[in-house]
Structure formats: C-alpha cells, structure tokens
Amino acid sequence: MNEIHGGDAAAHWDAAYAKGEDRVSWFQQDAGMSLRLIADLNPPVDAAIIDVGGGASPLAASLLSLGHTDITVLDLSRAALDAARAALGEQAHRITWLHGDLLALTSPRRYAIWHDRAVLHFLTDPPDQARYAELARNTIVPGGHVVIATFAPDGPERCSGLPVQRHDSRSLTELLGGAFTEVAHLREDHRTPSGATQHFTWFVARRT
Ligand SMILES: C[S@@+](CC[C@H](N)C(=O)[O-])C[C@H]1O[C@@H](n2cnc3c(N)ncnc32)[C@H](O)[C@@H]1O
C-alpha cells in the first residue's frame, strides 16, 4: 500500500470504521448510483479511475468484476482500506491502494474518472475546497470526468460527528471552477443502516 501524508484525522475515521463498515451511516450494500453514473460515461475498461475517500466502499470490487483494470482507491483510514482489501481477498492486488490525505495527493498519475462519494462535503474551509478543485483540475485528463456525491442543501448538517458543507449543482460548479462543465446532476435519498434518510446531490462534470 502506498503512503501519502496523513494526519490525526485518520484516527477519527479509523474509529468510525471500528464499529463495522456495514454499520456506518454511509454504508451501502452496492454502489448502484456510482456504477450507473460511471457507466453513463462509457469508459473503456482500461480507463484510469480513482475513488477518493473510497473507504470500504464496494465500488472498486464492482468495477473490478465489470472488467475494469486500472482502479485506485485512496483513503485516510487504514482500517477502511484493510476492510476493503480483505473483502476482495486474492483480487485485492489488482487495485492500487493509496493511504493518506487526499489534499496531500501528489501523484504524477492522471485519471479519466475521479469518483468521490461523501468526502468533499467534509471540506468546509474555502482553502481546502480550493485545494480539492486544484487537485481535480490537475489530476483529471482533459475530457475526463468527476462523479461527486455530497449531502444536498436539505441533507444532514453533520456526518460522523463532523460538520459538512452541503451542496447543489450550482455550488459544486462554482467550487470546481472554470475547468469543468456540468454533464448531469440528480438527487438521491440514501437510507442509512439505522433507517434514516439522507438527501444527496450527485454531480457529473467534464474536465474541459
Ligand atoms: C462518509 S465516508 C464515505 C466512504 C466511501 N466513499 C463510501 O461511499 O462508502 C468518507 C470517507 O472519506 C475518508 N476521508 C475523509 N477525509 C479524507 C481526506 N482528507 N483524504 C482521504 N480520505 C478522507 C474517510 O476515511 C472515509 O472513508
């Protein structure tokens, strides 16, 4: 597993996953919306896809089973990455795992698809949001895409004990800046394991 600069926040997320990755509020049995929106982009199977803050999500495993060959999962929580790798068993080596803070990402690699479900909304400081946009701009190839899910304006104000910045397509367009053009946006009601409903904004944009 490759290391990038981490921080104390990692302990927070490790503790969150310690209760079981299927008991966290963002748990989903399958990554249906992500898979649908990625499929709509019709990427070749060798397209480079990165799931930032991918945690223990089943997305990477599903992409692998669909034949994708260039998948990277980045997360601050080693516990989450260990759980995702354990779930994949012998197939785990077919995925590139990056452990650390996405804001410290200095990978020389470029990606066709940048996927983020429920990570950007934890960036509540404008400088961190600007850094995220800069990374997306520099990391995605022209013609590539972001697929981002955040809490919607009527979604929760906090998650995992942390404040969040909620978004609609307009604020996401503004945050990402002029290097992206919106392709699609939609709303989703996510049911948490405890039965609560969380409103999400999904947003797809093309790197121009
Ligand atoms: C709400 S969870 C979503 C996990 C996953 N995307 C999913 O849909 O199941 C947020 C994830 O982002 C990770 N995370 C939070 N801040 C991060 C950062 N600055 N860099 C990388 N990962 C981060 C956490 O460890 C956690 O796995």
Image (spheres, rainbow, N blue to C red):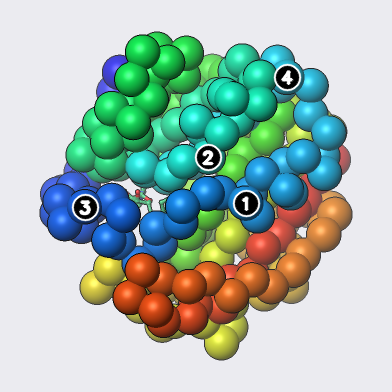
Between 187 and 141, the one nearer to me in the picture: 187
Residue labelled with disc 1: 32
Pointer 2 local density, CA inside 10 Å: few below 14, some 14–19, many at least 20: many
Answer with left or right where residue 162 lies relative to residue 57: left
Looking at the image, is mark 4 or mark 2 earlier in the sequence? 4
Numbered mark located on residue 59 in the image: 2
Numbered mark located on residue 20 in the image: 3
Pointer 1 local density, CA inside 10 Å: few below 14, some 14–19, many at least 20: few
Between 19 and 116, the one nearer to me in the picture: 19
> Three-letter amino acid code at disc 3?
Gly
Answer with left or right where residue 14 lies relative to residue 133: left
Q: Quadrant of residue 16?
A: bottom left
Answer with left or right where residue 66 lies relative to residue 13: right
Which residue is drawn at the image coordinates 59% and 60% (left, top)? 149
Which residue is drawn at the image coordinates 79% and 21% (left, top)? 44
Above or below 138: residue 7: below
Task: Locate residue 92, reporting x and y percent.
Answer: 39, 18
Q: Quadrant of residue 163?
A: bottom left
Task: Locate residue 147, reporting x and y percent.
Answer: 67, 49
